[in-house]
Every structure is written in structure tokens, then in C-alpha cells.
Image: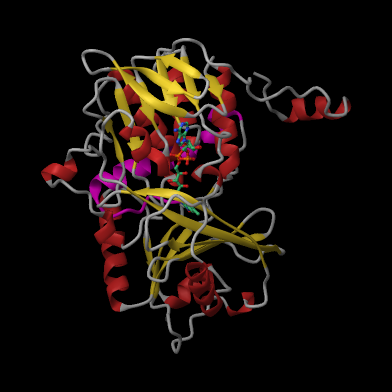
């Protein structure tokens, strides 16, 4: 693998930058692999990387129906935090946050992880009570989170409007200083490059169209538009299309797929120092390194597989943003887009074995799985390699929806970005 360093940059500069090689091979499918990962998003690429790096497997393929990072990984608003309410959630998301803190070094690839702080606004008494409960619960779990008065919130984020006579007055905020953002494409590319260097085949434009099972019912491989590929272990990390892919093996999941959208403004000079979220209004904002205001909205109210959301949802979000940050009223929006998110009844993910031997699934991340990318990838790899879950993902089974052991972040936060 060509390593990145100040020296290699300098040396390539002397040669007119003509010596850089492709970051990963354009692999063609082999007849069989020890493990196949379906889905070339951050979670799938990361799982392949950890299977090779941490669990010693080498003969691995990632099959992606489009291009890597073209799904939700390349479409999200990149908010990273770990201040979820329940013990199981704090363990899961903080596992990921700790991995983010060393990811650029681990991959020798700058994922532009920026711990600029994530501030969640409270607009009514219920929000205040819920967020204070989060602060206390997080601290018990060793996860940083602190309560801010409206004045302290404004000090942390000067553009914030804290006048009291608004439709959505700011009554306070919960701040996780270790939270922040990362560059989403870089996460996919960094994992792809590092996995490729360990021998993983990354196969783009390869759509899984069927999952083959042997006489005993166990997985024997995947049918694709480029032919059959044999493997006794298949991990599915297909986000909004998980229920479609798992349906090919006869597995039904409690998932619904919704469009979720985001938009960016024209670029401006640095003005927005942190990430601000308003769960009540479904509005999220940060500023990218290019200067664009990155804005996330809520999901559509109905299920669909379109990668674009309803206009009224974005309009509602922008109205709220303009009230919270009146100085942005005259900004122009440059682009908007959508992704398809897979939502479970309790808004917590599934990282588990399935009823089919050799078939594993990582899904249900809904609107909030980017922040979990390294953790989810590592835990999926562990589950595939050991054929049993890691203690952190042990509660995240499919069976919890049958047995009633929900991890109900939906009720806890009303949203899970
Ligand atoms: C607008 C938007 C904003 C978001 N904001 C945030 C945020 O701020 N913070 C946060 O934490 N999360 C956020 N999310 C959620 C986050 O993006 C996802 O949870 C996360 O990226 C999921 O990663 P993944 O690798 O599992 O999925 P993806 O990146 O979607 O990867 C799945 C891949 O599977 C492929 N695939 C599907 N079917 C097949 C098939 N049959 N054969 C082969 N390949 C297939 C797809 O093409 C896709 O590339 C947001 C999502 C959206 C859409």
C-alpha cells in the first residue's frame, strides 16, 4: 500500500503528482471466498477490513451493486456522538466513538474526524427533562455530556438565536464535546484502501440477486449479476435494502425503509463552530470544511425506496433553521439529496446472526448509523469470525422484537440521528 505522509506528499509533488497509484484494485469475482460482505458502505468495507486485520481472514470479498460509498455512507450529514440513553446504546456508540478517535492513524487516511462538539437543543419542558436524564445516564456510563443554559449554548454557538418569543424557544441544550463530524467519503475510501491492502476483493457494480442455501439450509453463496459466488459466510450490510436482501434467504426482518434527506448551502467563511441538533424540529446543522452549511431533515412520513424526500419536509426544516439562526435567511441552497434508511421498531440496530446458518446481518441503523461505522464494522466482523456476537452487540438481536427486550431509543429521544 502506498503510504501517505508529509514526505510522500513532498516527493509526489516533485514528480508532478504523477506517481500516485489507484487506492484499491478493481477486483473481479473469484469462484469462492471464505466470507462475503454484501454492501460497500462504510459498515461493509469496515467489516471486511476488521475480518482481515483483527480476525486473520484473508479470502474476503465486498460486493457492491453500485459504487462504494454511494449509499447512505456518502449521503449523510456526518454527525458523530455517543450520548444515547440506554446502557446498551452507550456501550455501542461509545465503542465506535473511541475507534473514531484513532481511525485516521489506523487507516493512514485522513477521515477528517473533527471533535467540534454536538449540541442538542431543548425547546420545551419535556425536552429539558429528557436531555437532563440523558446527561445523568451518560455520566454514569462514563460518556461525556453536559447541560447548558440558553446563554451558555449561545456562547458555544454564537449564531444561535435565544430570544424567548420564538416558535421554538431554546430552553437549554445538552452538549457532548467529544462529538463532531467526519468526512463520509473518506471513511469509505480509507476502509476500502486498507482492506484492499490486506487482500480483500472490492467488487463494484455487482448486485446480489439471490442467496443460495444448501440442503441443510445453511448459506452456500450469493447469486449476482456477475454470476454465482460461493461462500459459507455471508454478512449483509445493505442499509435501506436489507429487508430486500435478507428476503432472498427467506428471512423476514422488522424493518421499514424511509427516505431521509439532507441539503447544503452555498459555501461561506467559517461561521458555525459546532454541530447543532434539534430533535423536536428535526433540523440538524454543521459547516463543512468547504464552507457549506450541511443541513439534515427528518424522514418522510411514508415508506419508499426513492432516494429523494418530500419537499414539505425540507421546507419545514429550513423554516426552523431560519428561526434558530436568522442570519442564514438569505443563504442559497446548492444541493439536496436523499438516502433510504432502514428503521427498526425501537430505532436501535440489529447486529446479529440470523436464523440461517452462515448468514449475518448489520442493519436497522435508520437515521443514525454513520456515527457507529467503525464500531458496527468491528462488531459485525467479530460476529462473523467467531460465529457469535461480541458482548457489546449481544443485546442487538433480531429475537428482541419477539421477546420484548427492546432498546427503545425511539421513545428515549424521539429521533436517532
Ligand atoms: C440524509 C441522511 C442523513 C444522515 N445523517 C446521519 C448523521 O448525521 N449521523 C449518523 O450517524 N448517521 C446519519 N445517517 C445514517 C447513515 O448514513 C447510515 O446509517 C450509515 O451510513 C449506514 O452505513 P452502511 O454502510 O450500513 O450503509 P450504505 O452506505 O447505504 O451501504 C449499503 C450498501 O449496500 C449496497 N447494496 C444494497 N443492496 C445491495 C445488493 N442487492 N447487492 C449489493 N449491494 C447492495 C448499497 O448500494 C449501498 O452502497 C444519515 C442518512 C441519510 C440518508
Q: Could you tell me residue 223's position as x and y percent?
A: 42, 21
Residue 142 visible to an observer of this rendering: yes
Q: Is residue 155 above or below residue 46?
A: below
Q: Could you tell me residue 88's position as x and y percent?
A: 25, 44
Q: Residue at x 33, y 24 (%)?
A: 382
Q: Main secondary structure of the magenta part?
A: helix
Q: Is residue 267 above or below residue 183?
A: below
**Residue 397's quadrant in the figure?**
top left
Q: Residue at x 39, y 74 (%)?
A: 172
Q: Is residue 384 left or right of residue 57?
A: left
Residue farthest top in this picture: 31
Which residues are the magenta region?
A: 79-108
Q: Quadrant of the N terminus?
A: top right
**Residue 99's quadrant in the figure?**
top left
Question: Does the stretch in magenta take in 102?
Answer: yes
Q: Residue at x 53, y 16 (%)?
A: 29
115 or 264, which lies in front?
Answer: 264
Q: Quadrant of the C terminus?
A: bottom left
81 or 68, which lies in front?
Answer: 68
8 or 111, which lies in front?
Answer: 111
Q: Could you tell me residue 163's position as x and y percent?
A: 48, 85
Q: Is residue 229 above or below residue 321?
A: above
Q: Residue at x 51, y 11 (%)?
A: 30
Residue farthest bottom in this picture: 165
Residue 50 visible to an observer of this rendering: no
Query: How many labels, in total?
Result: 0
Question: Does the stretch in magenta take in 342?
Answer: no
Q: Is residue 318 left or right of residue 348?
A: right
Amino acid at each position: 500500500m502506498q503510504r501517505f505522509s508529509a514526505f510522500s506528499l513532498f516527493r509526489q509533488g516533485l514528480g508532478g503528482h504523477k506517481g500516485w497509484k489507484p487506492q484499491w484494485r478493481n477486483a473481479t469475482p473469484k469462484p469462492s471466498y471464505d466470507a462475503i460482505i454484501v454492501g460497500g458502505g462504510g459498515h461493509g468495507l469496515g467489516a471486511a477490513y476488521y475480518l482481515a486485520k483483527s480476525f486473520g481472514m484473508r479470502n474476503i470479498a465486498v460486493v457492491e451493486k453500485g459504487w462504494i460509498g454511494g449509499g447512505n455512507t456518502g449521503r449523510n450529514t456526518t454527525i458523530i456522538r455517543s450520548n444515547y440513553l440506554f446502557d446498551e446504546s452507550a456501550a455501542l456508540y461509545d465503542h465506535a466513538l473511541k475507534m473514531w478517535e484513532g481511525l485516521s492513524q489506523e487507516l493512514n487516511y485522513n477521515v477528517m474526524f473533527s471533535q467540534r462538539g454536538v449540541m442538542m437543543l431543548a425547546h420545551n419542558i419535556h425536552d429539558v427533562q429528557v436531555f437532563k436524564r440523558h446527561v445523568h445516564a451518560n455520566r454514569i456510563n462514563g460518556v461525556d455530556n453536559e447541560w447548558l443554559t440558553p446563554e451558555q449554548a449561545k456562547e458555544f454557538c454564537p449564531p444561535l438565536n435565544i430570544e424567548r418569543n420564538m416558535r421554538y424557544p431554546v430552553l437549554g441544550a445538552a452538549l457532548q464535546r467529544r462529538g463532531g463530524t467526519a468526512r463520509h467519503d473518506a471513511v469509505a475510501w480509507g476502509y476500502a484502501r486498507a482492506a484492499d491492502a490486506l487482500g480483500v476483493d472490492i467488487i463494484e457494480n455487482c448486485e446480489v440477486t439471490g442467496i443460495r442455501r444448501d440442503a441443510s439450509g445453511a448459506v452456500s453463496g450469493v447469486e449476482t449479476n456477475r454470476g454465482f459466488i460461493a461462500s459459507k459466510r455471508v454478512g449483509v450490510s445493505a442499509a435501506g435494502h436489507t429487508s430486500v436482501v435478507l428476503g432472498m434467504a427467506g428471512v423476514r426482518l422488522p424493518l421499514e425503509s424511509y427516505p431521509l434527506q439532507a441539503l447544503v448551502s452555498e459555501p461561506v467563511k467559517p461561521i458555525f463552530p459546532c454541530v447543532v441538533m434539534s430533535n423536536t424540529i428535526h433540523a440538524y446543522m454543521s459547516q463543512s470544511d468547504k464552507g457549506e452549511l450541511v443541513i439534515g431533515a427528518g424522514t418522510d412520513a411514508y415508506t419508499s425506496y426513492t432516494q429523494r424526500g418530500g419537499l414539505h419536509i425540507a421546507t419545514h426544516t429550513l423554516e426552523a433553521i431560519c428561526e434558530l439562526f436568522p442570519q442564514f435567511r438569505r443563504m442559497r441552497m446548492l444541493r439536496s439529496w436523499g438516502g433510504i434508511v432502514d428503521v427498526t421498531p425501537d430505532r436501535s440496530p440489529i447486529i446479529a446472526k440470523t436464523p440461517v446458518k452462515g448468514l449475518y446481518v448489520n442493519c436497522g441503523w435508520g437515521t443514525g448509523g454513520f456515527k457507529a461505522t467503525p464500531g458496527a464494522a468491528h462488531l459485525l466482523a467479530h460476529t462473523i469470525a467467531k460465529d457469535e456476537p461480541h458482548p457489546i452487540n449481544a443485546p442487538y438481536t433480531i429475537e428482541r422484537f419477539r421477546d420484548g427486550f427492546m432498546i427503545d431509543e425511539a421513545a428515549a429521544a424521539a429521533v436517532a440521528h
